[in-house]
Amino acid sequence: MFKYFFTYIDLIPKESRNELFSVQHLLALAMVACAWVLIILLFKNRTTIAKWKAIKCMSILLPLLELAQMLWYKSIGEFSWGYTLPLHLCSLMSIILPVMAFTGNSLLQEYSYAIGLAPALLTLLTPDVYYYPAVSFIYMQTMLVHGIICLIPLFMVFCMDFRPDIRKLPRVIAILVCFALLMIPVNQVTGGNYFFLRYPAAGSPMESFAGLVGSPWYLIPTFMLGCVLWIIFYMPFMVLRRAEVKNSGKMPAAAVKEEEKEHVLTG
C-alpha cells in the first residue's frame, strides 16, 4: 500500500495509478467530507475564543503542508520555481488564511469564502495530481490542503455565524485580479503557470474549456463558471437577507448587528 508513497509519478507503474472518480478518489472525498462534519459538530457549541483558536490551528497547517510539498519535490529532484512555489490560486491561501485568522480582517474572511471555497472544492473533485495513488504523499497532501481551505469558510458559516455578503464580492474580485496580474511577470520569469494563466490544470474543467476555445481563451469560460458558483454559494444568504427584510419591514437584524458581529469574528 505504501510502496509508492514518496515516489514521483514517472516511476509509478500505470496499473498503480489513480483515475478521477475512481473508488479511491470517492473514498478520499468521503473522508474529507466526514472530517468537515465532525469538526463543525465538535466546535459548534464551543466558545468564540475556542473557535478562533481552531481556525488559527487549521490555517497554520497550510503553510506547513506547502513547505512539506516543496521539500518533497526538492528531495526527488523535481523542484521547480515555475510550479512548486505557493503561488497558485489555492496554494496562495496558505498565506492569506493565516493572515486572516490572526488579524480577523473581514475582507479576507470574505475572500476565503468567495475565492477559497469554490476553487478548492473543484480541486477536490478534479485534483491535478489525480493520477497518483490515493495512498501517496502528494495525493494526500493535495486533498488535505484543499480540504482545509474549504473547511475554514464552512467553519465560519456554521460555527461562527459568518454571513457572506455579496456586496463585498466586487472588492474580493478586485483582489483576485491584482493577484492574477502579479502572476503574469512571475510566470514570464520562472516559465511557470501560476493561476493557470498559460495552460489549464490537468483533469480540471479548464482543460475541457481549452479544448473548446483554446488558450488562453479558456480563462473566460472559467471565470463564467466561477460566476455561476458564486451565485450558488451566495444565493442562500441573499434569500435569508431578503426574508429578514420582509419579515421585519426594516433593515435585517444581521445588517443591524453587522458591526457587533464583525467585532466578535475579529475577537
Image (spheres, grey):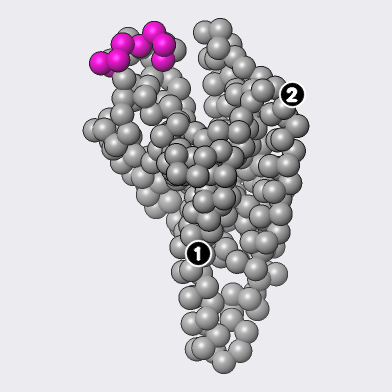
- Residue 71 position by quadrant: top right
Tell me if residue 14 is in the magenta stretch.
yes
Image quarter in which the N terminus is found: top left
Badge 1: residue crowd in 10 Å (few <14, some 14–19, many ≥20): few
* Picture coordinates of residue 82, whole percent (x, y): 64, 22
Q: Is residue 245 above or below residue 111?
A: below
Closest to the observer, 194 or 54: 194
Left/right placement of residue 130 relative to residue 91 reads left
User: Can residue 252 be seen by looking at this rendering?
Assistant: yes
Image quarter in which the C terminus is found: bottom right
Residue type at tag 2? Val
Instruction: Determine which residue is flagged by label 1.
Output: 231
* Picture coordinates of residue 83, whole percent (x, y): 60, 24
Q: Residue at x 67, y 23 (%)?
A: 191
Tell me if residue 168 is in the magenta stretch.
no
Q: Residue at x 48, y 76 (%)?
A: 239
User: Can residue 124 be seen by looking at this rendering?
Assistant: no
| CA–CA distance in space, label 1 to label 2 | 36 Å
- Residue 126 position by quadrant: top left
Residue type at tag 1? Ile
Which stretch did the figure color magenta? 9-16
Q: Is residue 35 above or below residue 226?
A: above
* Picture coordinates of residue 177, whole percent (x, y): 69, 48
The image shows a total of numbered marks equal to 2
